[in-house]
Image (cartoon, coloured by chain):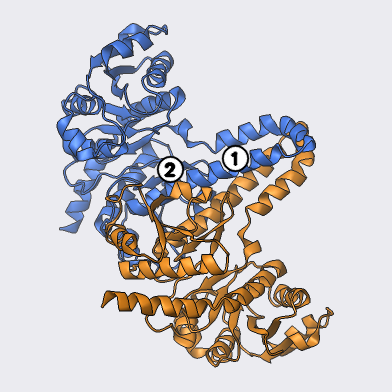
Chain colours: A orange, B blue
């Protein structure tokens, strides 16, 4: 098991834990020989789930964690008090280098706080951004930052752009990824104070392919691979994306049920529509990495099913193989040198 | 023509001017006897269009304006230099009380600048917000502010909430409209500095029905009637709404053309789908008012066709009949008194 990537997985996090989480872990090790999954959670519950499946048993171990952090709990307090929670235990394994990565569908707030407080930032990284992939007409784009770091400074956004570029180039395999900043117009002089100050700094960066501003309308067309914004805007974009998509779909479905004629039509288009919807579903690409930490932390949707958990686990392998953190470290050090 | 509402319309603004603008004006006066439209623009071109239609000629007049402000022009400069443009001439008519309202599909920037500089703010209004209606599952919500006033202060957002409430209650006829602030979580302690500071101020307002935070995901469900945010966020929401919707629709269409089976199905569902799309189309409700000015200025989509122009013109009647500006004035004065 020497060259295995060790992924600690929060067996208690999300709406479908532990069932779907355990199933996702089993699917991951049944797909790949080079993964060692450590399921962190209430031992009895986790083992009861594991018993349902056949898999190479040497690839999954269980580490007991008595407590569970609920989504509604204030994150800072939860991380501080619940030392025996699956999130704190899993993150400590990353900190102690007992695991390369930690995957959780649990409380976003607790994961963001825990990432900073327990795993810790790479030296020089000012803020660790949460960077989900969002579906576009052309594939996916990285939306960076969607975390809890609101009211960011220009220097944070510049680091987001660099870390995002490294991720898209080496994990998603997009050569020379296009980086754009979310703005309310295409021109350089448009924007709020933060964007106006950040724009020229991004233009100066020689190690990214900065293509300028992107208006929100263009995001779904996939015009940029790395979409830089501060976390409040990123959160609005991410959630509106989900909200408009699902509302639209439910309205189309309702419309299709409105007459006998359309019901028959609906039966005929079902396979094609399903295929279309699949291509507009980012969950197939795994979870959102929290970048810039001394180890990898991946946040998957709270509603994650086994497939997304599996993809999130497999994503950790590429992250480690490509030495993303090594590349981020080097980039941050080089950037700091350049400023002197 | 005593009790007519006089609406100046920018005959040269937008992608489909003057054809669709003139047609929209004709449709408006053919629908309502109580509207007097003043088409502002290049006389020959406008009159050539008018000749195509039959309508009560006493309800439409043409005022010549030689110049046109292009969308790409820097707005402040354009408003200052092009005194004979349709936007400047039309807005001056509102200022001089020769018109009750001005409707334009032209340059957003120029309309926002002209509204403030030429028409002028109601005394006490700190910033005039641009407030489009966005479609939801339940009808429409007012998204306030989507203008150019980025980096707003809490006191601006409080005024937006009040003006938006008055508009939704008296123009859109929604009793006791629910007001929410765009946030990245439902709890009061969530948000960026602006939202955290604004939230308690909105809670204190006795003249609005403040229901708390709204996450972007909930916006399409129509959970709030008035959605308060600063303009950068509002612009991102508005444009992403359009972008995700149109991308989604084009992907569904592409999917439907992928096989013979789905093509047949597409023919069957077409009427039902069209009906659904219509209910998710805000243009039927007219344009976006620029609130808080000494007169009404309405911005319609640059891509407006006759139907949207017509609705935008008719919308001005309700605005005047309900004395929205009188109500805003009173509210602002009462609020200022309350603070003393």
**Residue B325 lies in what quarter of the image?**
top left
Mark 1 vs mark 2, foreground winner is 1
Q: Position of residue A127 (x, y in %)?
A: 39, 75
Point out the image quarter for the N terminus of chain B: top left
What mark, if any, has residue B250 been given in the picture?
1
Residue A232 percent coordinates (x, y): 40, 63
Name the residue: 20% across, 55% down. B338
Nearer to the camera, A115 or A317: A317
Q: Is residue A190 above or below residue A305?
A: above
Residue B268 placement, left or right of A303 = right
Q: Judge left or right: residue B96 versus residue A327.
A: left
Instruction: Tell me whether the residue at label 1 lies in contact with that at label 2, contact meaning CB atoms closer than 8 angstroms.
Output: no
Horizontal and vertical percent position of residue A229: 40, 61
Residue B35 appears at what percent x and percent y?
A: 34, 18
A23 or A133: nearer the eye? A133
Element type where label 1 sits in the image:
helix
At 60% from the left and 40% from the top, the residue drawn is: B250
User: Image check: A264 left or right of B18?
Assistant: right
Determine the image quadrant of residue A334: bottom left
* Residue matched to label 2: B175
Give the chain letter at badge 1. B
Question: How many neighbours does mark 2 have within 10 angstroms: few (below 14), some (14-19), or many (20 or more)?
Answer: few
**B96 lies above or below B206:** above
- Can you say whether B82 is above or below B180 in the image? above
In the image: residue B290, left or right of residue B309:
left
Res A262 visible: no
Question: Could you tell me which residue is drawn at 55 percent across and 58 percent down?
Answer: A134
Residue for point 63% across, 47% down = A249
Per the model, the C-alpha gap separating discs 1 and 2 is 37 Å
In the displayed structure, would residue B12 be above or below residue A156? above
């Amino acid at each position: 098991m020497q060259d295995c990537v060790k992924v600690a997985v929060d067996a208690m996090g999300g709406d479908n834990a532990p069932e779907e989480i355990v199933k996702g872990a089993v699917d991951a090790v049944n797909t790949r020989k080079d993964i060692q999954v450590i399921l962190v959670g209430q031992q009895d519950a986790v083992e009861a789930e594991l018993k349902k499946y056949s898999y190479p048993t040497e690839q999954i171990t269980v580490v007991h964690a008595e407590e569970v952090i609920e989504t509604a709990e204030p994150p800072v307090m939860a991380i501080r008090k619940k030392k025996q929670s699956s999130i704190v235990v899993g993150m400590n394994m990353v900190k102690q280098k007992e695991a390369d990565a930690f995957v959780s569908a649990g409380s976003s707030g607790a994961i963001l706080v825990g990432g900073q407080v327990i795993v810790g930032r790479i030296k020089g990284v000012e803020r660790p951004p949460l960077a989900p992939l969002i579906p576009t007409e052309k594939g996916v784009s990285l939306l960076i930052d969607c975390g809890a770091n609101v009211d960011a400074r220009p220097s944070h956004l510049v680091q987001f752009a660099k870390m995002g570029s490294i991720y898209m180039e080496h994990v998603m395999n997009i050569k020379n990824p296009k980086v754009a900043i979310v703005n309310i117009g295409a021109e350089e002089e448009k924007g709020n104070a933060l964007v106006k100050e950040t724009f020229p700094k991004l233009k100066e960066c020689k190690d990214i392919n900065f293509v300028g501003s992107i208006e929100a309308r263009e995001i779904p067309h996939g015009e940029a691979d790395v979409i830089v914004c501060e976390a409040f805007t990123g959160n609005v974009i991410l959630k509106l994306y989900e909200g408009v998509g699902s509302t639209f779909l439910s309205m189309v479905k309702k419309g299709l049920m409105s007459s006998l004629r359309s019901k028959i039509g609906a039966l005929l288009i079902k396979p094609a529509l399903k295929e279309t919807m699949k291509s507009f579903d980012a969950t197939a690409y795994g979870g959102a990495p929290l970048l810039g930490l001394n180890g990898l932390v991946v946040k998957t949707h709270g509603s994650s099913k086994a497939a997304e958990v599996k993809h999130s686990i497999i994503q950790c392998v590429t992250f480690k193989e490509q030495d993303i953190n090594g590349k981020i470290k080097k980039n941050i050090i080089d950037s700091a040198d350049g400023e002197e």
